[in-house]
Every structure is written in C-alpha cells, then in structure tokens.
Amino acid sequence: MKIPCKTFSVLLLLAALTFSCGTKSLQDEIQSIKTELARQDSLIRELQAKASITKISSSGGIVSLVFDDGKTLSFDSSSTPVITVGKDGYWTINTVQTTIPATGSAPEIKIGQNGNWFIAGQDTGVKAPAASGSSLMNVILTTGSVVFYFADGSTVTVPFEYRTYLPKYYEGHIAQKEDAVVRQLSAAGKDNASFIFFTDSHWGKNQKHSPAIVQHLMQNTGINKVFFGGDVITSNSRDKEAMMKLGRDFQKAFAFAGDRFYGIYGNHDDNSTGQWSATEYHLTEPQVYSFLQSQMTGDNVYYEDYYNFHVDFRSEKTRYICLDTGRYYYGMFRDRMPVTARFLADALAGTPEGWNIIILSHLWAENTRVDGVLAPHIPAWILDLLAIADAYNARTGGSYKYKDSEPVPYDFAGAAARVVFCMGGHNHLDALLYSRKGIPVVLTTCDAGSLTSNSNVGTINEQSVTAVVVDYADSTVYFNRVGRGADRTLSFKKN
C-alpha cells in the first residue's frame, strides 16, 4: 500500500505520549502511573477495535494518522522523530540522513546505551529524545500496517489501507483542468478518444499523490482508462524482493482503476537496461508482468508477448498500440527489435476500417546535451521502427531490418485507418518530435518530481499526470497537465 504524505515512501513514526511528574508526592506519582496504565489499556482497546488507518499526513512537524472512523491520532515530530526512506535510499530521521541503507521491511528500532537511535542494530548517530515516561514507546509504519509498541512489550497492529486523498494545494488547480477536459469532450461530441497518461513514476522516489490525481480525474471527467508509460522501479537495486514489493505497492495504489489500468514496459522495470548487466539482479518477464500488467484482464486486450500489446475501444473507434522499446535502451538488447517491429506491422494491418490509432511506448528518444541543456532526439533505430507507421499512413510497403536479423516485410496498400500520434516518456522532460514523415511523437515528463530540478515538495510540481482528449472531427489533441508542466495542444493531419 502507498503512503500519501509529504515525506518519501516508507515512514517510521517513533511516538511518545508525554506526561511530567515534576515535584509530585509519591502518592501523586503512583496515581500518575495508574492513570498512564489506564490510558495505555484504553488506547490498546481502541486501536484493536479499529479496522484500518486510511490517511497519514504531516504539517508543521505534527504527524497525523487518520482512522477509518474519522478519528485522528497525532504526534509531534520534535519529540517523536519521523524516520523516512530518503531519495538516496537511506534511512532519514527527520531531516538527518543516516548511512544505513533502507531495504526490505521495517527494521528493529531502539535506543542504544549511548542514547542514539539504532536502526537494524546499527548506530544512526542521531540522539533520541529524552525518555518521557510514556507507555507508548514507538510506532512503526510500513506500507501495509502500523505497529504500535508499548513499554510492557505488547504490540497492536493496525492495517494501513491506502485510500487516495488529494492535498489541498491541488484542489483549485485540478478543478480547472477537469472543467477544461469536460468542455473539450463536450465540444468533440461522440467523435473523440480520451485517456489519462503518466510515466516514469520511479515509485521509490515518488511523493505518491498521482493515484489521488488519477482517481479524481476519472471521477470528475468521465475518462475511463489509464495508460502508464513505464518505469515503476527506481533502479540500481540488488534486492529483487524489494523491487517486487515496490512493484506490488505501485499496483495496489492504482487498484481503483481495475482492468482499465494499462502498464507499458520501461527500461528500469526489470532492473537490466540502464542498471545491472548481471542477470542474477534482473526480474523475470512473469515477475514484471505480475505488477505491471496482470490487472489487464479485459477481452479488448491482445498480447503478442509479455510487453507488446494493443487495446481496442470500439466506442471510440481507437486502437491503442503499446510497444516494448524499453528493453532496447542498450544496444545489446536490440536483437528483439524485429519482434516489436512485426507486432507493430501486424497490429496496424489488423486495425478496423475507419478507426484511429495511437501508439504508446516508453522510449522514443535519447537525450543529448546542447549548450548545457538536455535536448531529446529520435535515434535512427527508433526512426526505422516509426517508418512502419509512416508507411501505414502513406498506404505503402517496405521492410524493417535490424543489423543481421531477418527482415520484417510489410504492405499497407489496403490500410483503412490512420496513425494519429505517438506518446511516451523516458526522457524526464516534455517535448514534441516527429517521425521522418511527420507523425507527431509527444514526450511527457516524469511523474517522480524528486528526479527533476523543479519538484518543489508541497506544491503541485510534485507530480505530473496528463488528461488527453482527442477531438477527431476537429483534428486536435488536448494534453491537459495536472501538476508539473504546461498544457499542450496538437493539430494532426486528416487522411
């Protein structure tokens, strides 16, 4: 489950309910102890009666846990430190990053003889607050449950069931975007297509408000499907189980979308391309499928293999072709390019007459630096793949070949649909590029704001989600950006 709060990923809240004896008489002290024990017993019974925690938030140093009955339990982080997984993958206590890697489930946390916090048996070098006499010693929050630890050794575990919520700073912003989407859909009439697109979430480095944004858009615009452009995994991990857990948590966070959530393979998702060449650190195809695509159970989904698929929406007369290009980040993996090329040619050729085609993939371009600024360009090996779509729109034929592979012939003389545009991510920036024959290729910045220079935690720049409306009659595509980035409009050619 995901944690919708201002801090990164996994939180560990060390909580203490304080009271002071001061100069009380012995009788008063005994009564105070009895009162505290009664509070502990009451709190244990109350926690045991609760079904789940539904929201965690932090403001001004106060961390609040909201239960499913609406009640809130709050802690002051100055006396009850907040421990997070920092963006570099190390445990962080409040704002102090430790040198202890954060891997696996919540570790044992205790105060050492030197008065420092110890995490997983290692000294963090961070002083713990002075003992307060509270019966509630600490609270450990993982992505699936919250465990309350008491002084007498007893524990109470309360499930944390992720329920999306939208921070207040998004409310006016997203309302304006939703109004625009509704107007665009109304103006387009029945001759339209619409979907939500986001990409490069890198879930271990994400503020995790994008599920709330996506759900809000689906509830308030009528858009009924979501395409994710790839890169759930953060990268460079040797812990396969930790990567699988990250993937499962991501899938659970978007479970509300059901089988209308379509996952496209990204170059980080099996921990091979761009990370480790050693196969023992790679996730298998079934493992990636389990968190990226296993929810795609609709009968309108056609698979070529684990990663190449297309989805048909008859009400829109639109075929969404989703390609595996992520694994080709490094040349050593491009021997599979003919598989993707054959799938693309077959998917294009089989599109019903009068339909429109949108091609989605993770990787369309590579970045180069020009005068210190990143500038994306489409490399030749991707342009050659796009040439198949160019030939389809031109109703011509040709042959795709990568190095010494067998050629993939195609002939689109009888084509009766059109490719409108392509869309993807990978480059972590917004851009508009074109195939050799002018098919637009729309690049979208990453959802993980922490990987950009202008994420500004606590603002709408934390996330980046796009609501796409295609007005086929007017030959216009509207890209409505919620979060970081600007709205865009694209005009396309009519066949």
Image (cartoon, grey):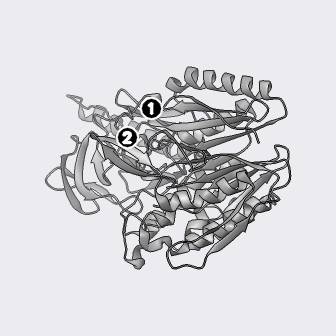
Q: Is residue 461 left or right of residue 18?
A: right
Q: Residues within 10 Å of mark 1 (few under 14, many from 20)?
A: many
The foreground one among 343 and 185 is 343
Q: Is residue 212 left or right of residue 240?
A: right
Instruction: Please give the name of the residue rendered at 82% of the width and 35% of the height, measured from the top-left corner.
Output: 191
Please tell me in which quadrant of the rendered image residue 321 appears. bottom right
Image quadrant in which the C terminus is located: top right
The foreground one among 247 and 102 is 247
Instruction: Please give the name of the residue rendered at 22% of the width and 45% of the height, measured from the top-left corner.
Output: 128
User: Residue type at mark 1?
Assistant: Asn
Element marked by disc 2:
loop
Q: Which residue is mark 2?
A: 452
Query: How far apart are the alpha carbons under marks 2 and 1?
Result: 10 Å
Please tell me in which quadrant of the rendered image residue 18 appears. top left
Task: Please state the horizontal and vertical placement of residue 118, each as a whole percent of the image.
Answer: 24, 56
Of pointers 2 and 1, the one earlier in the residue sequence = 2
Task: Please state the horizontal and vertical placement of residue 335, each as a whole percent of the image.
Answer: 51, 75
Q: Which residue is mark 1?
A: 461
User: Residue type at mark 2?
Assistant: Thr
| Vertical side of 397 occupied by 173: above or below | above
Element marked by disc 1:
helix
Task: Please state the horizontal and vertical placement of residue 57, each as a whole percent of the image.
Answer: 46, 34
Q: Look at the numbered discs 2 and 1 and tell me whether their residues touch, using CB distance below 8 Å.
A: yes
Q: Residues within 10 Å of mark 2 (few under 14, many from 20)?
A: some
The foreground one among 216 and 23 is 216
